[in-house]
Image (cartoon, grey):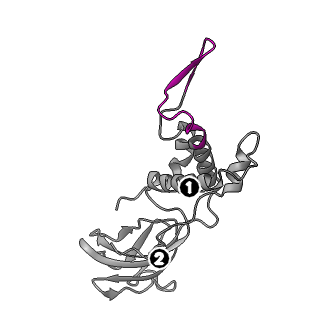
Amino acid sequence: MDDTTPLTPPPLADVATVKAWFSPPLTSTADDALLTRLIQAESGFIRAWLGRDPSLATYTQTLDGTGNAVLPLPYYPVMDVMAVAVDGTPVPTQAADQPLAYGYAHDGLSLVLTGGVFPKGRRRVTVTWTAGYDPLPAILEQACVELVALRYRERDRVGLVSKAHGGETTSYLQKEMPDSLAAALAPYRRVAPL
């Protein structure tokens, strides 16, 4: 699969937003480098959990043909499709005034081919398209902020499951992320298999 996306996608949050999330807000700059590293790590974790990059970018990939008229694209929402070729032969854009003529269109998730099929087989269809959110949905930034804050606080209790103090026991989260964040991010997970 050819992929012309940026090697380092932009972070999903920034240091100032993360520092403002704490109560009271963090005002020292002593941990800014640590917070920057955590933001990069948690942005990567969120992208991996989603199974895709939600940031706006342009992609060129050679995909496997499906053997039917619909070809799911691995990055979405699809904003624009600039070029499609099957086995090296360019496919025209579907003409608005000729809805039954041979050509492609997109529905936000997939390419749709009128008057033909994407032939089944490995690496048969080359597509250049733009996909992603601009701006990113606020929940993606908030999930990153909350995960960074969680990891920042966890550094003082790495490996602890619970701690007793003064007759009370405090238990610590042992999951990759809280259920509330997983539920909020679930609508953005990849829906089309590669």
- Left or right, 15 with respect to 79, comes to right
Whether 157 is among the magenta residues is yes
Residue neighbourhood size for the residue with mark 1, other residues' Cα within 10 Å, grouped as few (<14), some (14–19), many (≥20): some
Residue type for callout 2: Trp
Residue type for callout 1: Arg
Task: Look at mark 1 in the image and give the residue it sits on.
Answer: 37
Quarter placement of the N terminus: bottom left
Where, by quadrant of the figure, is residue 10 drawn?
bottom right
Circle 2: element type: strand
Residue range (magenta): 152-171
Q: Residue furthest top?
A: 167
The disc placed on residue 46 is none
Task: Look at mark 2 in the image and give the residue it sits on.
Answer: 129
Taking the spot 53% from the left edge, 52% from the top edge, the residue there is 42
Q: Position of residue 143 (x, y in %)?
A: 59, 48
- Residue 140 seen in this snapshot: no
Taking the spot 56% from the left edge, 43% from the top edge, the residue there is 151
Reply above or below: 22 against 110: above
Q: Nearer the viewer, residue 22 or 59?
A: 22
Q: Position of residue 109 (x, y in %)?
A: 46, 65
Taking the spot 49% from the left edge, 62% from the top edge, the residue there is 53
